[in-house]
Image: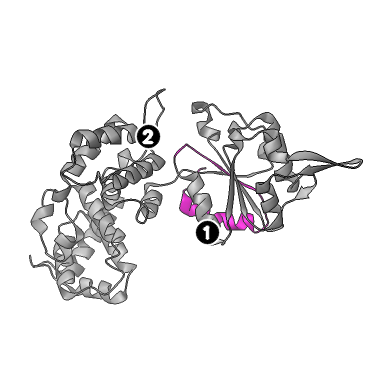
Amino acid sequence: MAVDFKTFLNVVPFVTSVNKPVLLRGRHGIGKSQVVYQYAETVNLPVVERRASQMTEGDLIGLPSIDGDRTNWNPPNWFKTACEQPVVLFLDEVDRATIEVRQGIFELTDSRKLNGHRLHEDTLIFAAINGGEHGAQYQVGDMDPAELDRWTVFDVEPSVEDWLDWGKSNVSDMVWDFVNQNRQHLEHADEFEPNKVYPSRRSWHRLDECLQVGNLLDQNVDTAVLYSVATAFVGFEAAVQFQDFVANYDRQVSVENLLDEGKLEMVEDFGINEHTAMVDKMEAAAVFEDALSEERIQNLADYVVTLPSEVAMKLWTLLGNGPLDNTVAVHRAESRSGKKISAYLVEILGDGDKEEN
Protein backbone atom coordinates (compact mmCIF):
# COMPACT_ATOMS: atom_id res chain seq x y z
CA MET A 1 0.00 0.00 0.00
CA ALA A 2 1.32 3.42 -0.95
CA VAL A 3 1.81 6.13 1.68
CA ASP A 4 1.74 9.90 1.37
CA PHE A 5 4.74 12.00 2.37
CA LYS A 6 3.29 13.01 5.72
CA THR A 7 2.93 9.36 6.69
CA PHE A 8 6.38 8.56 5.31
CA LEU A 9 8.02 11.29 7.39
CA ASN A 10 6.23 10.02 10.49
CA VAL A 11 7.25 6.40 9.94
CA VAL A 12 10.77 6.56 8.50
CA PRO A 13 12.46 7.60 11.82
CA PHE A 14 11.66 4.12 13.16
CA VAL A 15 13.62 2.62 10.26
CA THR A 16 16.59 4.97 10.41
CA SER A 17 16.82 4.57 14.19
CA VAL A 18 18.17 1.06 13.53
CA ASN A 19 20.16 2.28 10.52
CA LYS A 20 18.37 0.29 7.82
CA PRO A 21 18.51 1.50 4.20
CA VAL A 22 15.37 3.17 2.86
CA LEU A 23 14.05 2.86 -0.71
CA LEU A 24 11.35 5.20 -2.04
CA ARG A 25 9.45 3.82 -5.01
CA GLY A 26 6.97 5.81 -7.08
CA ARG A 27 6.15 7.80 -10.20
CA HIS A 28 8.51 10.43 -11.59
CA GLY A 29 8.18 14.07 -10.58
CA ILE A 30 6.26 13.49 -7.34
CA GLY A 31 8.97 14.83 -5.03
CA LYS A 32 10.83 11.74 -3.84
CA SER A 33 14.15 13.58 -3.81
CA GLN A 34 12.65 16.57 -2.05
CA VAL A 35 11.22 14.48 0.76
CA VAL A 36 14.65 12.88 1.32
CA TYR A 37 16.16 16.36 1.68
CA GLN A 38 13.27 17.34 3.93
CA TYR A 39 13.94 14.40 6.21
CA ALA A 40 17.69 15.11 6.23
CA GLU A 41 16.91 18.61 7.45
CA THR A 42 14.85 17.26 10.34
CA VAL A 43 17.78 15.10 11.52
CA ASN A 44 20.30 17.89 10.82
CA LEU A 45 22.44 15.89 8.39
CA PRO A 46 23.93 17.02 5.05
CA VAL A 47 22.90 15.10 1.94
CA VAL A 48 25.45 13.41 -0.31
CA GLU A 49 23.55 12.66 -3.52
CA ARG A 50 24.68 10.50 -6.42
CA ARG A 51 22.74 9.43 -9.51
CA ALA A 52 23.34 5.73 -9.78
CA SER A 53 22.21 5.81 -13.42
CA GLN A 54 25.26 7.92 -14.33
CA MET A 55 27.81 5.94 -12.36
CA THR A 56 30.36 3.46 -13.61
CA GLU A 57 31.72 0.69 -11.41
CA GLY A 58 34.79 2.84 -10.69
CA ASP A 59 32.60 5.77 -9.65
CA LEU A 60 31.12 3.53 -6.97
CA ILE A 61 33.92 1.37 -5.60
CA GLY A 62 36.88 3.64 -6.39
CA LEU A 63 40.19 2.96 -8.14
CA PRO A 64 43.14 0.79 -7.13
CA SER A 65 46.63 1.97 -6.26
CA ILE A 66 49.78 -0.11 -5.73
CA ASP A 67 51.65 0.16 -2.46
CA GLY A 68 54.62 -2.18 -2.69
CA ASP A 69 53.18 -5.66 -2.89
CA ARG A 70 49.73 -4.49 -1.82
CA THR A 71 46.79 -3.17 -3.80
CA ASN A 72 44.68 -0.51 -2.06
CA TRP A 73 41.29 0.70 -3.16
CA ASN A 74 40.87 4.46 -3.01
CA PRO A 75 37.22 5.42 -2.47
CA PRO A 76 35.70 8.30 -4.42
CA ASN A 77 35.38 11.57 -2.50
CA TRP A 78 31.63 11.29 -1.99
CA PHE A 79 31.96 7.85 -0.39
CA LYS A 80 34.94 8.96 1.69
CA THR A 81 32.79 11.78 3.07
CA ALA A 82 30.03 9.31 4.02
CA CYS A 83 32.66 7.20 5.82
CA GLU A 84 34.27 10.05 7.73
CA GLN A 85 31.16 11.89 8.92
CA PRO A 86 27.43 11.26 9.35
CA VAL A 87 25.44 12.13 6.23
CA VAL A 88 22.31 11.09 4.38
CA LEU A 89 23.72 9.11 1.45
CA PHE A 90 21.10 9.41 -1.28
CA LEU A 91 21.39 7.18 -4.35
CA ASP A 92 18.88 8.25 -6.99
CA GLU A 93 17.69 6.26 -10.02
CA VAL A 94 19.12 2.98 -8.73
CA ASP A 95 16.90 0.98 -11.09
CA ARG A 96 18.51 2.75 -14.08
CA ALA A 97 22.05 1.79 -13.02
CA THR A 98 24.15 -0.87 -14.70
CA ILE A 99 24.12 -4.34 -13.18
CA GLU A 100 27.73 -3.85 -12.00
CA VAL A 101 26.84 -0.69 -10.09
CA ARG A 102 23.76 -2.31 -8.60
CA GLN A 103 25.83 -5.25 -7.39
CA GLY A 104 28.09 -2.79 -5.61
CA ILE A 105 25.08 -1.09 -4.04
CA PHE A 106 23.92 -4.57 -3.01
CA GLU A 107 27.07 -4.91 -0.88
CA LEU A 108 26.64 -1.39 0.47
CA THR A 109 23.09 -2.00 1.68
CA ASP A 110 23.98 -5.44 3.01
CA SER A 111 27.15 -4.69 4.96
CA ARG A 112 27.45 -0.86 4.90
CA LYS A 113 30.89 -1.06 3.30
CA LEU A 114 32.62 -1.16 -0.10
CA ASN A 115 36.03 -2.68 -0.70
CA GLY A 116 36.87 -2.56 3.00
CA HIS A 117 35.76 1.05 3.56
CA ARG A 118 32.90 1.23 6.06
CA LEU A 119 30.30 3.96 6.28
CA HIS A 120 30.19 6.15 9.36
CA GLU A 121 28.00 4.46 11.95
CA ASP A 122 25.48 7.34 11.82
CA THR A 123 25.33 7.68 8.04
CA LEU A 124 21.86 6.92 6.66
CA ILE A 125 21.28 5.29 3.26
CA PHE A 126 18.35 6.39 1.08
CA ALA A 127 17.52 5.58 -2.54
CA ALA A 128 14.75 6.32 -5.03
CA ILE A 129 13.42 4.50 -8.07
CA ASN A 130 10.57 4.75 -10.57
CA GLY A 131 9.85 1.04 -10.52
CA GLY A 132 7.33 -1.06 -8.65
CA GLU A 133 3.69 -0.65 -9.69
CA HIS A 134 4.64 2.00 -12.26
CA GLY A 135 7.73 0.22 -13.59
CA ALA A 136 6.16 -0.79 -16.91
CA GLN A 137 5.98 2.89 -17.92
CA TYR A 138 9.72 3.41 -17.52
CA GLN A 139 12.89 2.06 -19.09
CA VAL A 140 14.21 0.65 -15.84
CA GLY A 141 15.61 -2.64 -14.62
CA ASP A 142 13.59 -4.87 -12.32
CA MET A 143 14.95 -5.53 -8.85
CA ASP A 144 15.08 -9.20 -7.94
CA PRO A 145 13.80 -10.42 -4.54
CA ALA A 146 17.28 -10.66 -3.03
CA GLU A 147 18.06 -7.08 -4.03
CA LEU A 148 14.77 -5.71 -2.69
CA ASP A 149 15.23 -7.69 0.53
CA ARG A 150 18.20 -5.45 1.42
CA TRP A 151 15.98 -2.36 1.40
CA THR A 152 13.12 -1.08 3.51
CA VAL A 153 10.70 -0.31 0.67
CA PHE A 154 8.17 2.53 0.78
CA ASP A 155 5.78 2.87 -2.14
CA VAL A 156 4.96 6.58 -2.08
CA GLU A 157 1.94 8.35 -3.54
CA PRO A 158 1.84 11.89 -2.15
CA SER A 159 -1.45 13.70 -1.71
CA VAL A 160 -2.31 17.05 -3.27
CA GLU A 161 -2.10 18.49 0.24
CA ASP A 162 1.52 17.31 0.48
CA TRP A 163 2.40 19.51 -2.49
CA LEU A 164 0.28 22.44 -1.34
CA ASP A 165 1.92 22.38 2.09
CA TRP A 166 5.35 22.34 0.46
CA GLY A 167 4.33 24.93 -2.13
CA LYS A 168 3.33 27.57 0.44
CA SER A 169 6.99 28.52 0.80
CA ASN A 170 8.37 27.28 -2.51
CA VAL A 171 6.16 28.62 -5.34
CA SER A 172 4.44 31.92 -6.14
CA ASP A 173 0.93 32.68 -4.87
CA MET A 174 -0.42 32.58 -8.42
CA VAL A 175 0.87 29.10 -9.20
CA TRP A 176 -0.18 27.86 -5.75
CA ASP A 177 -3.69 29.28 -6.21
CA PHE A 178 -3.99 27.72 -9.66
CA VAL A 179 -3.01 24.25 -8.46
CA ASN A 180 -5.22 24.58 -5.39
CA GLN A 181 -8.24 25.44 -7.53
CA ASN A 182 -7.39 23.08 -10.42
CA ARG A 183 -6.06 20.03 -8.62
CA GLN A 184 -6.66 17.76 -11.58
CA HIS A 185 -3.79 19.56 -13.33
CA LEU A 186 -1.18 19.02 -10.61
CA GLU A 187 -0.02 15.82 -12.23
CA HIS A 188 -1.00 13.14 -14.72
CA ALA A 189 -1.86 9.90 -12.94
CA ASP A 190 -3.03 7.72 -15.85
CA GLU A 191 -1.11 5.95 -18.60
CA PHE A 192 1.39 8.15 -20.43
CA GLU A 193 1.39 8.58 -24.19
CA PRO A 194 4.92 8.46 -25.64
CA ASN A 195 6.56 11.86 -26.30
CA LYS A 196 3.69 13.86 -24.77
CA VAL A 197 4.40 16.49 -22.11
CA TYR A 198 2.38 16.12 -18.91
CA PRO A 199 2.26 18.19 -15.72
CA SER A 200 3.97 16.93 -12.59
CA ARG A 201 4.74 18.33 -9.16
CA ARG A 202 8.30 18.93 -10.30
CA SER A 203 7.30 20.61 -13.58
CA TRP A 204 5.04 23.13 -11.79
CA HIS A 205 7.97 24.10 -9.58
CA ARG A 206 10.25 24.46 -12.59
CA LEU A 207 7.63 26.50 -14.45
CA ASP A 208 7.19 28.77 -11.44
CA GLU A 209 10.94 29.41 -11.25
CA CYS A 210 10.94 30.37 -14.94
CA LEU A 211 7.91 32.63 -14.59
CA GLN A 212 9.34 34.46 -11.60
CA VAL A 213 12.78 35.03 -13.11
CA GLY A 214 11.23 36.16 -16.43
CA ASN A 215 8.58 38.36 -14.75
CA LEU A 216 5.90 36.41 -16.61
CA LEU A 217 3.38 36.43 -13.76
CA ASP A 218 2.34 39.97 -14.60
CA GLN A 219 -1.21 39.99 -15.96
CA ASN A 220 -0.11 42.35 -18.73
CA VAL A 221 2.33 39.80 -20.12
CA ASP A 222 1.88 38.62 -23.70
CA THR A 223 -0.49 35.66 -23.33
CA ALA A 224 1.06 33.90 -26.31
CA VAL A 225 4.46 33.97 -24.58
CA LEU A 226 2.97 32.74 -21.30
CA TYR A 227 1.12 29.93 -23.06
CA SER A 228 4.22 28.80 -24.99
CA VAL A 229 6.36 28.74 -21.86
CA ALA A 230 3.72 26.92 -19.79
CA THR A 231 3.12 24.34 -22.53
CA ALA A 232 6.82 23.48 -22.56
CA PHE A 233 6.72 22.63 -18.85
CA VAL A 234 3.24 21.24 -18.13
CA GLY A 235 1.73 20.34 -21.50
CA PHE A 236 -1.14 21.67 -23.59
CA GLU A 237 -4.20 20.99 -21.42
CA ALA A 238 -2.80 22.48 -18.21
CA ALA A 239 -1.25 25.43 -20.07
CA VAL A 240 -4.60 26.45 -21.59
CA GLN A 241 -6.23 26.56 -18.16
CA PHE A 242 -3.25 28.29 -16.56
CA GLN A 243 -3.15 31.00 -19.24
CA ASP A 244 -6.83 31.80 -18.65
CA PHE A 245 -6.31 31.75 -14.87
CA VAL A 246 -3.47 34.29 -15.05
CA ALA A 247 -5.45 36.56 -17.39
CA ASN A 248 -8.32 36.66 -14.90
CA TYR A 249 -6.30 36.58 -11.70
CA ASP A 250 -7.43 40.03 -10.61
CA ARG A 251 -10.96 38.61 -10.40
CA GLN A 252 -9.86 36.00 -7.88
CA VAL A 253 -11.38 36.41 -4.44
CA SER A 254 -8.79 37.02 -1.74
CA VAL A 255 -9.00 36.21 1.96
CA GLU A 256 -9.03 39.95 2.60
CA ASN A 257 -12.03 40.42 0.28
CA LEU A 258 -14.05 38.15 2.55
CA LEU A 259 -12.71 38.63 6.06
CA ASP A 260 -11.77 42.31 5.98
CA GLU A 261 -14.20 43.72 3.41
CA GLY A 262 -17.10 41.28 3.79
CA LYS A 263 -17.67 41.08 0.02
CA LEU A 264 -19.94 38.05 -0.04
CA GLU A 265 -21.25 39.05 -3.46
CA MET A 266 -17.91 37.93 -4.88
CA VAL A 267 -18.62 34.31 -3.91
CA GLU A 268 -22.32 34.14 -4.72
CA ASP A 269 -21.73 31.90 -7.75
CA PHE A 270 -19.14 29.68 -6.08
CA GLY A 271 -19.58 25.93 -6.18
CA ILE A 272 -18.19 23.47 -3.66
CA ASN A 273 -14.74 23.34 -5.32
CA GLU A 274 -14.35 27.12 -5.25
CA HIS A 275 -15.46 27.32 -1.62
CA THR A 276 -13.03 24.54 -0.70
CA ALA A 277 -10.24 26.44 -2.44
CA MET A 278 -11.23 29.57 -0.51
CA VAL A 279 -10.93 27.75 2.81
CA ASP A 280 -7.57 26.37 1.70
CA LYS A 281 -6.46 29.95 1.01
CA MET A 282 -7.40 30.88 4.56
CA GLU A 283 -5.35 27.98 5.87
CA ALA A 284 -2.37 28.91 3.69
CA ALA A 285 -2.57 32.50 4.94
CA ALA A 286 -2.63 31.22 8.55
CA VAL A 287 -5.49 33.61 9.34
CA PHE A 288 -6.74 31.53 12.26
CA GLU A 289 -3.44 31.16 14.07
CA ASP A 290 -3.84 34.54 15.81
CA ALA A 291 -6.78 36.20 17.53
CA LEU A 292 -9.50 37.35 15.11
CA SER A 293 -10.81 40.92 15.22
CA GLU A 294 -14.51 41.53 15.82
CA GLU A 295 -14.86 42.56 12.18
CA ARG A 296 -13.32 39.34 10.94
CA ILE A 297 -15.48 37.26 13.28
CA GLN A 298 -18.62 38.94 11.92
CA ASN A 299 -17.58 38.56 8.28
CA LEU A 300 -16.59 34.95 8.89
CA ALA A 301 -20.00 34.25 10.44
CA ASP A 302 -21.67 35.76 7.37
CA TYR A 303 -19.58 33.52 5.13
CA VAL A 304 -19.99 30.29 7.10
CA VAL A 305 -23.78 30.20 6.74
CA THR A 306 -23.46 30.38 2.94
CA LEU A 307 -21.24 27.30 2.73
CA PRO A 308 -22.13 23.73 1.77
CA SER A 309 -22.14 21.63 4.92
CA GLU A 310 -18.93 19.71 4.17
CA VAL A 311 -17.01 22.92 3.48
CA ALA A 312 -18.45 24.55 6.59
CA MET A 313 -17.19 21.62 8.67
CA LYS A 314 -13.77 21.86 7.02
CA LEU A 315 -13.64 25.54 7.98
CA TRP A 316 -14.84 24.79 11.50
CA THR A 317 -12.14 22.14 11.94
CA LEU A 318 -9.52 24.60 10.71
CA LEU A 319 -10.80 27.23 13.12
CA GLY A 320 -10.59 24.74 15.96
CA ASN A 321 -6.87 24.26 15.36
CA GLY A 322 -6.25 27.89 16.37
CA PRO A 323 -6.81 29.82 19.61
CA LEU A 324 -9.86 28.68 21.58
CA ASP A 325 -11.12 32.27 21.84
CA ASN A 326 -11.63 32.34 18.06
CA THR A 327 -13.76 29.20 18.14
CA VAL A 328 -15.85 30.46 21.04
CA ALA A 329 -16.38 33.89 19.44
CA VAL A 330 -17.51 32.48 16.09
CA HIS A 331 -19.72 29.89 17.78
CA ARG A 332 -21.53 32.69 19.64
CA ALA A 333 -21.77 34.94 16.60
CA GLU A 334 -24.84 35.62 14.49
CA SER A 335 -24.75 36.34 10.78
CA ARG A 336 -26.17 39.59 9.43
CA SER A 337 -28.90 37.47 7.85
CA GLY A 338 -30.03 36.56 11.38
CA LYS A 339 -28.73 32.97 11.56
CA LYS A 340 -26.88 31.93 14.71
CA ILE A 341 -23.69 29.99 14.01
CA SER A 342 -24.30 27.58 16.89
CA ALA A 343 -27.71 26.68 15.46
CA TYR A 344 -26.31 26.37 11.93
CA LEU A 345 -23.62 23.96 13.09
CA VAL A 346 -26.22 21.79 14.82
CA GLU A 347 -28.25 21.88 11.61
CA ILE A 348 -25.45 20.71 9.32
CA LEU A 349 -24.31 18.09 11.81
CA GLY A 350 -27.86 16.75 11.82
CA ASP A 351 -27.85 16.65 8.02
CA GLY A 352 -24.63 14.65 8.13
CA ASP A 353 -26.15 12.11 10.53
CA LYS A 354 -29.17 11.70 8.23
CA GLU A 355 -26.92 11.05 5.23
CA GLU A 356 -25.01 8.36 7.16
CA ASN A 357 -28.26 6.66 8.16
Is residue 198 toward the left or the right of residue 142 in the image? left
Specify which label sits upstream in the sequence, 1 or 2. 1
Which residue in the structure is indicated by mark 2? 188
* Residue 3 in sight: no
In magenta stretch: residue 196: no
Reading the image, the residue beneath label 1 is 41
Relative to 285, say whether 133 is above or below.
above
Q: Residue at x 52, y 52 (%)?
A: 37
Q: Is residue 226 left or right of residue 156?
A: left
Query: Residue lying furthest right in this view?
Result: 69
Image location of residue 224, percent across then percent down: 20, 33
Q: Residue furthest top?
A: 194
* Front in this rendered view, residue 290 or 155: 290
Residue 15 pos. (x, y %): 63, 54
Q: Secondary structure at mark 2?
A: loop
Q: Amino acid at mark 2?
A: His
- Residue 257, located in which quarter of the rendered image? bottom left
**Residue 67 at x, y = what percent?**
87, 43
Q: Pointer 2: residues within 10 angstroms few (<14), some, or many (20+)?
A: some
Q: Secondary structure at mark 1?
A: helix
Could you tell me how many numbered marks the image carries? 2
Q: Observer-nearest residue: 334 or 62?
A: 62
Q: At label 1, which amino acid type do we have?
A: Glu
Q: Identify which residue is drawn at 20% across, 69% down.
A: 342
**Highlighted magenta segment, given as a residue range:** 1-29
Above or below, comparing residue 69 to residue 232 in the picture: below
